[in-house]
């Protein structure tokens, strides 16, 4: 399940690089918050405290309740970096098993 969430979030963040209606970005914030909370819970269940902390920070960054105004350019950089990290974590977790 976490693989599907990571791939889905990475795709959504890449789509954020394109000009979309504002409602799309709000939806991405809700889905990212829910997805990162779930990933943090799974990391906690696997006793992976460092990844749990990373996912909690990402959930707080993308949370939909209080808008964090960083500007479009900085959000684009964050979206790309988080997408790369999510996709990269698929390969590192696979090699650890």
Image: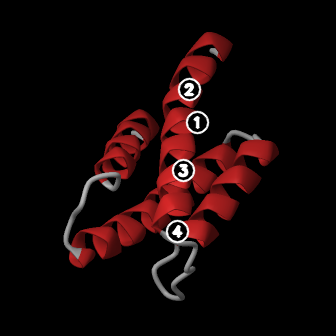
Horizontal side, residue 75 vs residue 5: left or right: right
Q: Are marks 1 and 4 in contact (CB under 8 Å)?
A: no
Q: Are marks 3 and 1 in contact (CB under 8 Å)?
A: no
Residue tagged 3 = 77
Horizontal side, residue 84 vs residue 15: left or right: right
Seen from this angle, which residue lies furthest bottom?
66
Between the C-alphas of marks 1 and 4, the distance is 15 Å
Q: If you read the primary sequence from the N terminus, does the residue marked by circle 4 or circle 3 appear first?
A: 4
Residue tagged 1 = 85
Q: If you read the primary sequence from the N terminus, does the residue marked by circle 3 or circle 2 appear first?
A: 3
Nearer to us of marks 4 and 3 is: 3
Q: Are marks 1 and 2 in contact (CB under 8 Å)?
A: yes
Q: Secondary structure at mark 1?
A: helix
Q: Are marks 4 and 2 in contact (CB under 8 Å)?
A: no
Which residue is rendered at x = 60% and y = 68% of the image?
61
Q: Are marks 4 and 3 in contact (CB under 8 Å)?
A: no
| Residue 2, horizontal then vertical, whole percent | 45, 40
Which residue is rendered at x = 56% and y = 26% of the image?
88
Q: Secondary structure at mark 4?
A: helix
Query: How many badges with numbers are in the image?
Result: 4
Q: Residues within 10 Å of mark 2 (few under 14, many from 20)?
A: few
Residue 62 is tagged as 4
Residue tagged 2 = 88
Q: If you read the primary sequence from the N terminus, does the residue marked by circle 1 or circle 4 appear first?
A: 4
């Amino acid at each position: 399940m976490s693989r599907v969430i990571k791939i889905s979030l990475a795709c959504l963040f890449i789509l954020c690089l394109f000009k979309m209606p504002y409602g799309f970005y709000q939806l991405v914030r809700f889905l990212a918050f829910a997805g990162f909370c779930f990933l943090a819970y799974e990391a906690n269940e696997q006793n992976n405290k460092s990844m749990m902390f990373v996912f909690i920070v990402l959930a707080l960054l993308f949370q939909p309740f209080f808008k964090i105004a960083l500007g479009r350019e900085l959000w684009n950089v964050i979206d790309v970096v988080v997408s790369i990290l999510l996709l990269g974590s698929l390969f590192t977790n696979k090699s650890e098993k």
